[in-house]
Amino acid sequence: MSKKPSVPKGTRDFLPLQSLRRQYIFDTAKQVFLRYGYAPIETPAMENLDTLLGKYGEEGDKLIFKILNNGDYLSKASDEKIDARDSQGLAMEISDRALRYDLTVPFARFVVQNQNELSFPFKRYQIQPVWRADRPQKGRYREFYQCDVDVIGSDSLLNEAELLCIIDDVFAELGLSDIQIRLNNRKILHGIAVASGLAEHFSSMTVAIDKLDKIGLDGVKQEMLRYGLPEAGVKKALALINLKSDAQQTLKMLSGALTGVEEAYRGILEVREVLEHLPEAVREKVSIDLTLARGLNYYTGAIIEVGHPDFPSSICGGGRYDDLTGIFGLQGMSGVGVSFGADRIYDLMEDKGLFEEVVQSGSEVLFVNFGKDEVAAAWNLAADLRAEGVSCEVYPDAAKMKKQMKYANDRGVHYVVMIGEEELKRKEATVKDMRTGEQVQKTHKELVAYLSGQA
Amino acid sequence: MSKKPSVPKGTRDFLPLQSLRRQYIFDTAKQVFLRYGYAPIETPAMENLDTLLGKYGEEGDKLIFKILNNGDYLSKASDEKIDARDSQGLAMEISDRALRYDLTVPFARFVVQNQNELSFPFKRYQIQPVWRADRPQKGRYREFYQCDVDVIGSDSLLNEAELLCIIDDVFAELGLSDIQIRLNNRKILHGIAVASGLAEHFSSMTVAIDKLDKIGLDGVKQEMLRYGLPEAGVKKALALINLKSDAQQTLKMLSGALTGVEEAYRGILEVREVLEHLPEAVREKVSIDLTLARGLNYYTGAIIEVGHPDFPSSICGGGRYDDLTGIFGLQGMSGVGVSFGADRIYDLMEDKGLFEEVVQSGSEVLFVNFGKDEVAAAWNLAADLRAEGVSCEVYPDAAKMKKQMKYANDRGVHYVVMIGEEELKRKEATVKDMRTGEQVQKTHKELVAYLSGQA
């Protein structure tokens, strides 16, 4: 094989620094989730094909990666489909399994399958990759991680409030405390549709509103008219969803405008209660955004989206769903959850230089290798340093000094320790701070205390 | 859908407690790897099919999960293969990608592809799942994690010694300090083949020796004779590999028996040097085991296997390879690495009850929900507790006491805090220790200090 090997289109290798930074994001989120009593689960990368099919719409089905059955798979396929070269039809007969497309459907399957072993309300987080056969483009990958946190089996609005606190904590710990949380409620949206005479067009209405960011208010209006919605209703609905004021004021105006619309009334109460539960510091980051529709039809209550002034798209989002597990035969399980966009958070943090202080790419300390006798001393000192929790390494080969120093530099090592022949005799070491260039002389005895104090 | 959904055969869901325990193993290993200057990398779950094919032998190729191309894949396939119902041949035309089968081949591909961005010697660890279409059976899964740590681009034997120290540290931190490390060297094995006149049968010899655990020494002998190896040579080789003594003594006897066999001599020197580098505490866990062959043909020097007296099979293993990246066109990259068997380590730790003290399944503290006003106080106290690093949760619904206590029990919560109507008035709380049943009364002010001191 002479061609340089590569990864499949739309997938990525992560180099050490990238991996460490990704781990930092996930570990930070995990610590917060655990503090709120959410526990991790894992599901297999592959699900039975019929678990996934039909859950993401026709377009979604096409983007599911199917796994070819092993063995003589053609012997079990129908001649008819083969002879007709029916790729789509045959796929169902020669692949029993597929890669998961998101974490939501596997989570629903998990809850139904393991319901007797779970305590409800069940609070879980899940951080795993998903796969989609999307056309690869900037910022869109065929393999990417989702980071979901959900509570299922409780319709208390304390859960919504708790998730908003979790969101605030996670981003604050990542150095992104200036997030903006947008909140809506599907019941209010539906109430607006009812009050505007668009009840039967609710789905088209939300699909159009969902495009607001891209096409603007007038674009949404044109889109709704194109779908055949009555113009008077469209105008009324758009005037309502375009209300812009602070949270309390917006809710007050809505109450007035939607008097008598039972569902809207319940939605407004829900939003009020969620806001009441929030500590002031979180509440002031929340705005009511009635343009927040999130096309996903399974949302039934709260809709949440989180943005940041320095980033163009949302970095976290979710909502309340009342019947996620119904597709697998378990009714009446209300849940609410949010999903953190790890790739976007990564890009935002990188842009803002937030990783610099917190993620170190290589070891803290490198011992230069001057040969057999010198290295034995370095080896022992390195073990002592590790026992103090300092990451360090001994260069494995007695290579040229220049090569070893280049390695230290490339790896971002903070301190280089040199124990040459003379230093070995005197039981000393030269320590070079790679960031300042400063060198100090230490005895072997002083070295560990010195470096573990610095590190 | 009325049938209860399930995961594909050979794959598993991990419930919260299992996931936390698995995370504990991985996190413990990671901390050790980082302390020695090994950094993480990640590669995509799917590789191009031609990256994987031909690397695992004919049997291995059959166990690779191939991903069906999306779109009208049949239109690009040859009619000939379709009409002949040639499942194997057609698979190559309708799947461009496959799931990784191990972490070794993707690592080699990674090093070649990213060579200009890496600093050598390159020390990496990688903890990711792999997939094999094996027949599922007890302890063998179609999806399982590998946890590999390697250094590539250095032939120094310090690396072998370092990996043995890493192995010792990881297992010690997991509570398994009584591991047994078996060490061999491919060069010695080859030297034994040469000295026994079996040089041209080296591969058959190692394949037979590899089965020693299962079929015993006599079985290995029969197997070698069946392969057509000369009986005198077989007897001599088996007498040598069956040498049983302490490490130094074994090496001494070998030196005598293999005088003049250049390759054996180098192998013996290598083993001696590795042992010399080890701290006494690690060295005494190492024995020389000449029956350790590990069928994998890519090993060229050290062969390492780790066992535990309470477990039937090896829990970690690896060795030195001199030409892993050669398959992708990059020559002369010597490396050495080991792989930790996460599933087996999990089983062993579970058997020995080693998770009990270190992994907590639910939150530390649960606040009972007595209704709107009471919950507001609980909510604030919970926030204060979390700020002290104590994981806690407020039951989201004002459900019956019995239900809430059952939840606390099922989740393994340590403390339940009750703030009922009366307690709220007095700004007090009742704290129940769920392990002893003991109850104490605390003021709200005392509560946080009390629980964060206990937790």
Image (cartoon, coloured by chain):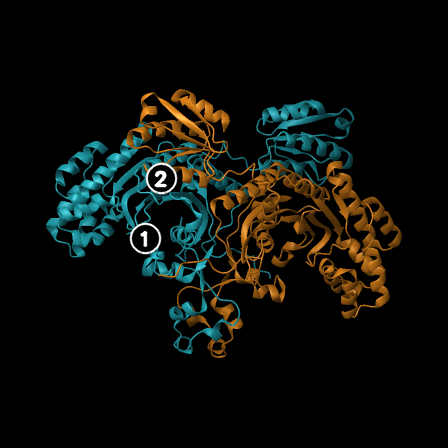
Chain colours: A cyan, B orange
Label 2 chain ID? A
Q: Nearer the viewer, mark 1 or mark 2?
A: 1
Q: Earlier in the sequence, mark 1 or mark 2?
A: 2
| Secondary structure beneath label 1 | loop
What is the quadrant of the N terminus of chain B in the image? bottom left
Instruction: Have a look at marks 1 and 2 and say if they share a chain.
Output: yes
Type of amino acid under label 1: Gln
Percent x, y of residue A303:
29, 43
Q: Is residue A111 visible?
A: yes
Taking the spot 39% from the left edge, 44% from the top edge, the residue there is A120
Tell me if mark 2 has few (under 14), some (14-19) or many (20+) residues whose alpha carbon lies within 10 angstroms of its own. few
From the viewer's side, name the closer residue of B97 and B424.
Answer: B424
Residue at the far left in the pictured view: A232
Q: Which residue is mark 1?
A: A331
At mark 2, the secondary structure is loop
Q: Image quarter for residue B199?
A: bottom right
Distance of label 1 from label 2 (alpha carbons)? 39 Å
The location of residue A391, given as percent across then percent down, is 61, 34
Residue A394 badge: none
Q: Position of residue A158 (x, y in %)?
A: 32, 36
Classify residue B95 as left or right of residue B137.
left
Q: Residue at x 78, y 53 (%)?
A: B290
The residue that disc 2 covers is A311
In the rendering, at what x and y percent does residue A232 appear? 10, 49
The residue sitting at 44% across, 71% down in the picture is B76
Chain at numbered mark 1: A
Q: Amino acid at mark 2?
A: Phe
